[in-house]
Structure formats: C-alpha cells, structure tokens
Amino acid sequence: MAKANCTIVEAPQGEGKTNTATAIAVDKYFDSIYAVESPEGTQLPVRPYKLDTVELQPLDGINTEPMLVQIPYELGWQPKSTERIFANYHLFGIEYMYADPETVLNLINTGIISSGTWVVDEAYITGEARRGMNTLNLVYTWLAQQMRKRDIELYLLVQHGRFIDWRFRYIAKRKILCRYDEKTNMIRLLVQNLAKGTEKTLRYYAPNYWKFFDSFELPPMPDLMVQKAGAWAAAGKGEKEIKRLLRKMQAFPNLETGTIDFGQPTEVTGLGK
C-alpha cells in the first residue's frame, strides 16, 4: 500500500483491526531486516524473505551460498531492522517501542517518536469524539497533524470512525475496512484512498500474524481519567443517582429480600380454554 501519514483502520469487534495493523507493522519490519543477533550480541547479515524466515548471507566457515533460515527465537536470537515500530499494545518477535499515553507524553518533545510506524489500538481512548477539548485528546490530535514532519505513518484502530475526534477523520488520507472470515481465517480489506477517491480490495491469511500479538490485550485507560470517573460515581451526579434509586426502592419495602409482594393472584375468567 502507498504511504499515508494517517490511516483509520475500522471494523466491528473481532473483525481483524488489530490483526491488520499488526500485519502492516510486522511486514514493514521484516521488509527492512538486515541482521539477526545472538544473545551474546553477534550479528549475522540477512535479507528479507517471508516474515521471520530470512535469507542468511554467505559467511566464512558457515555457508558459501545464501540459505533460508527461520529466526531461532527459542535460542535467544532476535531480528534487527531499520524500521521503527511504535504501538500501544505488546508485540512479539520484533523490536518496537511500547507507546502508551504516559510514554508518548514523556517523549513528545524529544524527537524519539519519529521515522517509523505508529499503531494506536482502541483509538477512542485517546481521541474520544465527544471529548474534543480534553487535554489528552488535544495532544494526540496535535501529534496526528505532525506525522509528515515526524516521518511517521499513523494507524488509528476503532470500531467506527465516528467514535474518534473529527480532527483525526479530517486529516486521515486512507481508511481500511476489515472483515474476518472464521471459516477460511482470511481477512478481507477494503482500502479507501480518501485523497483520490479510489478504493481496492485485498485479502490475507490472518494466522500468519497471530504469534506477533495478543488479540485479547486491551490498551490501558489513563489512570487520572479513571479516577475522575470514580469520583463522579461517588459524588455529584453519581450521588444524586443513588438517592433517586433509594427513593424508588422505598416504594417497594420488600425489595431488599429480592421479592415484591403484589398480593394474591386474581383469577381471570372469560378467556376460554
């Protein structure tokens, strides 16, 4: 796919958003692989072949011609690539930076978050459509508008585009819609070029990428926002709601036992048999 500085990956739950974004990031990483490194730090030159199967280059005393090998992760070997990956969920089998909101905010002015691919799963957490003036929302939308200058391809993952801030939708140059087929394990993509008004379809085999991520991992919600929600539940509107429920319960004094006494049933006649 052609480069777009901001892409929205959209699909209902379980239809392959995270799988697709992971596949894009992992493909980019292995397309730029240049070596595999041992636990002791020895690097062997390789060329890309297919994901973590690489072409080992000739080495004195080892092989006289290129040979295909799968990276022996179980022995502690790791791939080395020129592609930088940032993600707010954990990846396996590649080097990347875990970029949760706290890390992003700490590094925002350091230049570290640049020149790479950045995946933001559950993007509504940091870009909720109804909280556009929230400070975290503002900072992330500012960042999204800097993607070209930072040389980053940003992928925002969400169940529906309307769930995230309109500024993300406005600057996105591409949208990817995903559908997962449980029978074939294939994911079908509809890739829309929003700048040109064109679209194309692609398909890929989802299990090829399952080992690189955990499909059940949830990116964390910001602690301060959770604390504010807790304070709201304990006081203010939350307290009024509790009082309202208590008044309703007083109308049914037996509610605390789990039953309400409505008296004896009345026989209804005239309905026939």
Image (cartoon, grey):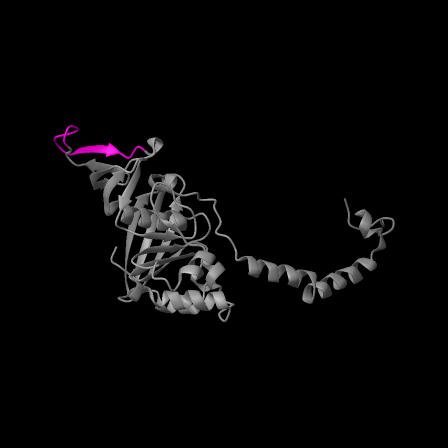
Q: Position of residue 163 (x, y in %)?
A: 47, 62
Looking at the image, the residue that sits furthest to the right is 264
Residue 40 lies in quadrant = top left
Residue shown at the point (29%, 53%) measured from the top left: 201
Q: Position of residue 19 (x, y in %)?
A: 38, 47
Magenta region includes residue 65:
yes
Q: Quadrant of the N terminus?
A: bottom left
Q: Is residue 129 visible?
A: no
The image shows residue 254, relative to residue 194, as above or below, that is above
Residue shown at the point (49%, 64%) measured from the top left: 128
Left or right, 66 with reference to 182: left
The image shows residue 196, relative to residue 90, as above or below, that is below
Left or right, 272 with reference to 166: right
The one of 165 and 272 positioned closer to us in this rendering:
165
The one of 75 and 265 positioned closer to us in this rendering:
75
Q: Position of residue 272 (x, y in %)?
A: 77, 47
Task: Please state the extent of the stretch shown in magenta in the rendering.
Answer: 60-72
Q: Position of residue 112 (x, y in %)?
A: 34, 58
Looking at the image, the residue that sits furthest to the top is 61
Residue 107 lies in quadrant = bottom left
Residue shown at the point (33%, 31%) measured from the top left: 75
Q: Quadrant of the C terminus?
A: top right
The one of 169 and 36 positioned closer to us in this rendering:
36
Looking at the image, the residue that sits furthest to the front is 40
